[in-house]
Image (cartoon, rainbow, N blue to C red):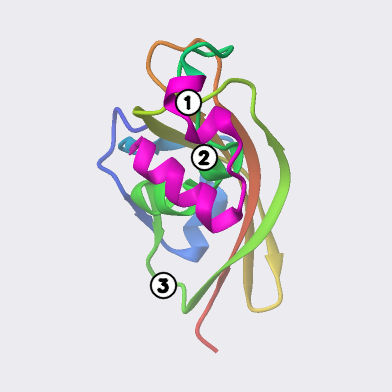
Amino acid sequence: MTDTDTQLPVRVTIAELPSLVGTTVGTAPAIEVTQERINAFAEATEDRQWIHTDPERARSGPFGTTIAHGYLTLSLASALMWEVLQVTDAAQVVNYGLEKVRFPAPVPAGSPVSMTLDIVSVEPVAGGVQVRYRGTFTVPDNSKPVCVTDGLFRYYEEQ
């Protein structure tokens, strides 16, 4: 299954999730990472390093512009995931955490960021299932992904 042969978001039941293991579910529409979003993230996290917040200084820096915080890019995972996959009969959905995160390339300010969602595994847990997904974030004109993460979501059935 890929986003080229199905409409997003893909809607499945908890029972159907195992059939997605090993597939690319789809690619979410891009979210623009504006300088304003970067500045707001810097304030919220108190990470005001110039490479993120000072466009004038960043012009002469290693990337020629400001770049998004890696954790800002990562924070888009949940929103982008909902654009790709919805589990229709889940009474509760829990973001259970992350297994692995890497930031292979920067996100220049003003870049649209999209995420491709792959289902790595589905395992039973009390009252539902735990899904391990791989989110691969990309920006146009960059051959490397800007973030790759293995995340865990739990989908619980009605009790």
Q: Give the range drawn in magenta.
A: 32-57
In this picture, residue 65 sits left or right of residue 96: left
How packed mark 3 is, by other alpha carbons closer than 10 Å (few <14, some 14-19, many 20 or more), is some
Res. 62 image quadrant:
top right
Is the residue marked by circle 2 packed among few (<14), some (14-19), or many (20+) residues within 10 Å? many
Which is more N-terminal, label 2 or label 3? 2
Residue that carries the numbered disc 1 in the rendered image: 66
Task: Name the residue type under label 3.
Answer: Asp
What amino acid type should be assigned to the residue bearing mark 2? Answer: Thr
Q: Measuring 30% from the left and 27% from the top, which residue is drawn there? A: 4
- Residue closest to the eye, 6 or 45: 45
- Distance between the alpha carbons at the discs numbered 1 and 2: 14 Å
Query: Foreground: 22 or 117?
Result: 117
| Element under disc 2 | helix
Q: Which mark is residue 73?
A: 2
Q: Which of marks 1 and 3 is nearer the N terminus?
A: 1
Q: Which of marks 1 and 2 is in front?
A: 1
Badge 1 amino acid = Thr
Residue drawn at 43 percent across, 26 percent down: 55
Q: Name the residue under label 3.
A: 89
